[in-house]
Amino acid sequence: MNGPAMSGAAASGPAMSGAGDLRLTWVQPEDLIGHELAQAARDGRDATEIERRWHEAGGHPAPPRAGASPAAATPRLRALAEELLDELALLESPLAVYEPTDLAGIRAMCAAWSPGRGAHGTPPPADAPAGAGAPTHPLADVPPRTACGPQDLKVFGATPAPTAVPAHSAPAPHATEALPRTDPAAGPATDTFTRTAPATRAHPEAPDRPVHTTANTGPARPSPVTVAQLHAAWLGRAAGCLLGKPVEKLPLAGIRALAAATGNWPLRSWFTAKGVPAELTAAYPWNRRSAPTSLAENIDGMPEDDDLNYPLLNLLLLQRHGREFTTAEAAKLWLDELPAGRTFTAERVAYGNLLHGIEPPRTAVHHNPFREWIGAAIRADVHGWTHPGDPTAAAEQAYRDAVLTHTANGVYGAMFVAATIASAAGQGQGQGQGQGQGQGQGTDGDVHACLRAGLSVVPPRSRLADAVRLGIAVAGEHARTDFEPVVDLLHSALGHYHWVHVVPNTALLAAALTHADGDFTGSICRAVSGGWDTDSNGATAGSVAGLLAGHPDRLPERWTAPLKNRLATSVGGFDGIGFDTLAEITHQLAAPAPAPEEAPHP
């Protein structure tokens, strides 16, 4: 995920003649209000009257792809936007019962922290009986949903029934069988959702220090992750990000057409402008900021991207404050080390909130309509890399980072990624047979177990969990076909979300990893070819698949050689650093192997 800090005249260079020339992206109230209205619709909050007032006053909808509208609002309209943002914040969501933001509420709902789990929250095996490891907290009795929010109910043909109380069931949240069939072609779903329990506090005060839930006694143990695995993970994250950069923000049809024009569809290598007809690039222009450094003919090392900046920042966080860092310490580090112009969406809003004296976790909610977008998830890799084999510890560490900027599904996305990566990091060194030169490469890692670990830390009735299960199920049903039908079904079901929202992007990530069976080339190419936030999805897929490959030599050279072991960044002290050095630093920060529990849970 990347984009300009400014748009319009200020971005293009002419001297500014007035306030209207400064179009700072992702923060202007007149642009935020449209996104907050869209978030309210996703949440089932009735904002009809607020929306009417906005439009009658001359307000515009949210920009569909850019971070700012072409022209600034009048002072009167901007003041109204700020007033309406405050009013929207007071509307309660009927989905809050399924989607707590406080860690205690998340733990209570999730299988990873339930009695009967394996050591350190590892999920039951795929063939475990239905309901194994299901949560025992009273909120576990909340009826399951089949959709991802009120507008999704329309897609799947279901209708909300706030007063109905259907029979309860608690399927295992890690099992794909728990997903009702949501293929639109298979007919409408008819399940309902209710509000039968009080909503958990959405924005609690963040604890000063984390509460440990993982055993860590006995003599020191070496980390189960190797430097080679981490090297492959860093390279994988960079290559996947770089693959997606030139087509970020493009619609699905454009990505497919540009790749097909050069014989690169299904996607299997870098995008190139060579041989693409001019009329095609006019219809689907490459990302103007990224194309000069990310098309095949232009790649010369890894250019700067926020998908790599945040892992670097989190290395600094762990170096300075250790794995017990607080959210406040993360916020201070941002102010010290992260240039404001290198932040986007939720991160930029939270950064501005910090500068206005607003403290975490309120930084995540004050005038922040992007709090359930993908930003926290792209910061989560380091939390997984440094807790190999310990998904719950990784998820809790990611939580303390995420609540600086995100809530609910936005936080779950980070926890899901961290736990998935922690599981991959703890699976060994990937003794596959591939030697890194062909279409893919072998791996002994089980990507499906990794995804189950990721789901085990996500509230099972949340929209994020629904979407991930949908992605896994659809990919499984099309395992013997190409990936296009999977993508088409996901876009049909989830295409009403913004292209940077965490829900559709995490569904696509899970589908890509499932369909590719963890293969490196297959994983990053599927993630990018599915559209939406292409560079962020490619980056996370590459991180997981790189870990499972286990060694840089098992990644195809066409992906790693152009990186030239060099990363550009504006995060202080890291510009020009090599991925091998980053792997060494990360390994020094990794937790030791989790201690076995003294006795199994009853």
Image: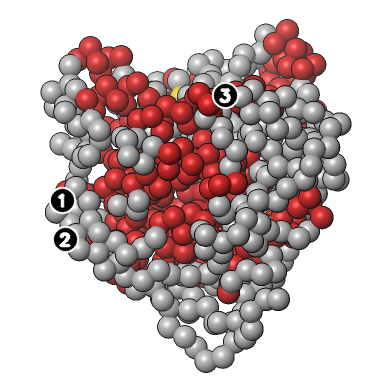
Q: Quadrant of residue 385?
A: bottom left
**Any mark on residue 157, and which?**
none
In the depicted structure, whether residue 52 falls above or below residue 433 = above
Q: Report crowding for label 3: few under 14, some 14 to 19, many 20 or more residues within 10 A (C-alpha).
A: few
Q: Quadrant of residue 98?
A: top right
Q: Report crowding for label 1: few under 14, some 14 to 19, many 20 or more residues within 10 A (C-alpha).
A: few
Q: Is residue 165 left or right of residue 526?
A: right
Q: Secondary structure at mark 3?
A: loop
- Using the image as rendered, state which of residue 159 and residue 523 is in the foreground: 159
Where is residue 354 shown, x and y percent of the image?
65, 48
Q: What residue would you read off at disc 1?
A: 438
Where is residue 223 shown, x and y percent of the image?
43, 78
Q: Report crowding for label 2: few under 14, some 14 to 19, many 20 or more residues within 10 A (C-alpha).
A: some
Q: Is residue 40 left or right of residue 385?
A: right
Q: Residue at x 85, y 45 (%)?
A: 197
In the depicted structure, whether residue 129 falls above or below residue 3 = below
Q: Is residue 340 left or right of residue 226?
A: right
Q: Residue at x 73, y 17 (%)?
A: 51
**Any mark on residue 187, and which?**
3
Q: What residue would you read off at disc 2?
A: 435
**Does residue 371 show up?**
no
Q: Secondary structure at mark 1?
A: loop
